[in-house]
Structure formats: C-alpha cells, structure tokens
Amino acid sequence: MKISIVITAFKEPDTIGRAIEAVLKNKIIKKFEIVVACPDEETKKVVNFYAQKYKNVRYFRDPGKGKSYALNLILKQIACDLLILTDGDVYVGENSITSLLSHFSDAKVGIVSGRPVSASPKNKMLGFWSHLLLDAGAHVARNESFESGKIVEASGYLMAMRSGVIREFPLNVAEDAIIPYLFWKKGYKTSYEENAIVYVKNPDNFSDFVKQRVRTAKAHENIRKIAPDFLRVKSFRNELAKGWHRALAYPKTMKELFWTLLLFPARLYIWMLVFYEDRILRKHYGDGWERVESTK
C-alpha cells in the first residue's frame, strides 16, 4: 500500500517546514511520500531544501489558480492507494496520520476527517472564539454525524481518502464538504477521527476573522445548488437550532461567558454579509488563493 500525503501551500515559507516535519514525526509503517504543492518561489525553495534532505519529499508544480484547482490536478496525476490532504500553514499531531489510516481497515470507508484544534491563545477573545467554534462547534457536529451514520463534513485542514474514487470536483464549493458527499454518492462511508489532530492558528484581529468566516460560509452556500440532497452542517439555520446551547455550555469563567455572548452578534453580522454578497451582490465563492495574514 502506498500513501501520498499532499500539503497545499501559498506564500508560506515560514510555516511549510513545520508542516513537513510534523508529518515526518508520525510513525507511519506503510510506504509514503510527502508531496508539497505551491505556486510561489519562496515556498518552493523551502520545499526543495526538504526534498534534498528526504527522499520521500517532493515538489508538485501548482499553476496558482487556487487550492481546489491544484487538488483536482493532484487527484488525476498522483498514483497511490490512500491520499491524505493537509495545508502548509497548519501542522499535524504526532499520531494523527496513523489514527486516520486505522479507519481504512473497513473497506466501506472512503474518507476520514481529522480534528482541527486551535493553536491560538485562549486567554484572548478571538483566540477563545476559535477554541469554542472548533471544540463546541465543528468537533461536536462531526462526532454527531459520524455516530449517527450521516455524511461527515471533512476538514480541509486534514482529511484522508481512498485514491482513484474521486478524480475531480467542482471549483466553486468547499472541498471539505463536496468530496465527502461525492464519496457518499458512490456508496462509501464517511468517517471522523478525533485523535487525528491538526493544529490551526486562527485570526487575531476582527477584520481577518470576518474575512475568513465569510469566505468559508460562502463556499458552503454553493453546495445547496450542486447537491440539494446534502444536509449541510455549516449553515445559519443549524447555528440557530443547535449552536447557541453548545456555545453557552462552553465557557468556564465569567470573562469567557461575556466573550461568548459577544460572539452571537459577530456571527449574525457574518451571516448577514454572506447573504448580502451572495444573494444581493451576486458575488459568489470562487476558487483562488487568498491569504489571511494573521493566521500565518
């Protein structure tokens, strides 16, 4: 069995080395390679340094048209049995890769999502928000979907899948939602591994927080047009129905409770922007590299 671990990156020379080294620290007993796709020369130089140092690290030329575009090229060109996708501005835990791989002993499992964990300080409001949204939000939602046998929306920060099943997916949607849906349509199970941790630095200013969340929400809005039978997890309706009580149960101190209450109008503002841009201005999500500086 051959495993290809693909790291997509864009102008991340300062973090790509950490991402590569974190993968190498995993004790992977199967044959594997690390393929780093990036369009910029600065990141490519760092990748080439690691490629000279490690025989199983190589560079993949990304034409610079966006992450989804690059992934579609990779899905068609890389020959392997299992494909693991992660990003150049995050880093995996020491047992994350092996935890993901354990699910594929079940031949019916097509794709497995890892668990993003915030690497931002919890003692500041935006850092606390990132922990709340990932722990009480995304983690709980994925776990509930997994345990109930529903489609698990994967994390774009870390996911593993069987190679050769999906050769291409639409560019105007979030890959972490549409790829599991395509596996499900082909009769595969989608899975979740909470021990497959990937550490993510989140925005440390409100402007970047809004920018990142609006883009993510718009990417998931497009799924209803392509896959109307897919019950989305990331939606305004779900936040209203399930998110509020999860959020209020998360804080441990009065300060954290105050920050949690401030998150509600912030999320409402984000969903209003999504509605305005998507439905009024008709500025729909499209693939393309876009940096959120404070997450680097």
Image: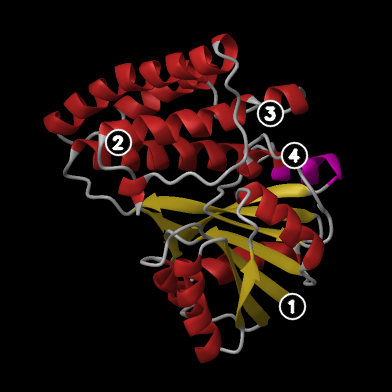
Residue 171 falls within the magenta-colored stretch: no
Mark on residue 129?
2
Amino acid, disc 3: Ile
Q: Quadrant of the N terminus?
A: bottom right
Q: Which residue is mark 1?
A: 2
Amino acid type at image mark 1: Lys
Residue on which the image places disc 3: 223
Which label was assigned to residue 47? none
Which residues lie in the magenta part? 179-187
**Circle 1 crowding by C-alpha within 10 Å: few under 14, some 14–19, many from 20:** few
Q: Is residue 185 magenta?
A: yes
Query: Where is residue 190 shown, x and y percent of the image?
Result: 70, 47
Q: Nearest to the eye among marks 4 and 2: give it.
A: 4
Q: Disc 3 vs disc 1: which is toward the camera?
A: 3
Residue found at the very far front of the displayed protein: 41
The C terminus lies in quadrant: bottom left
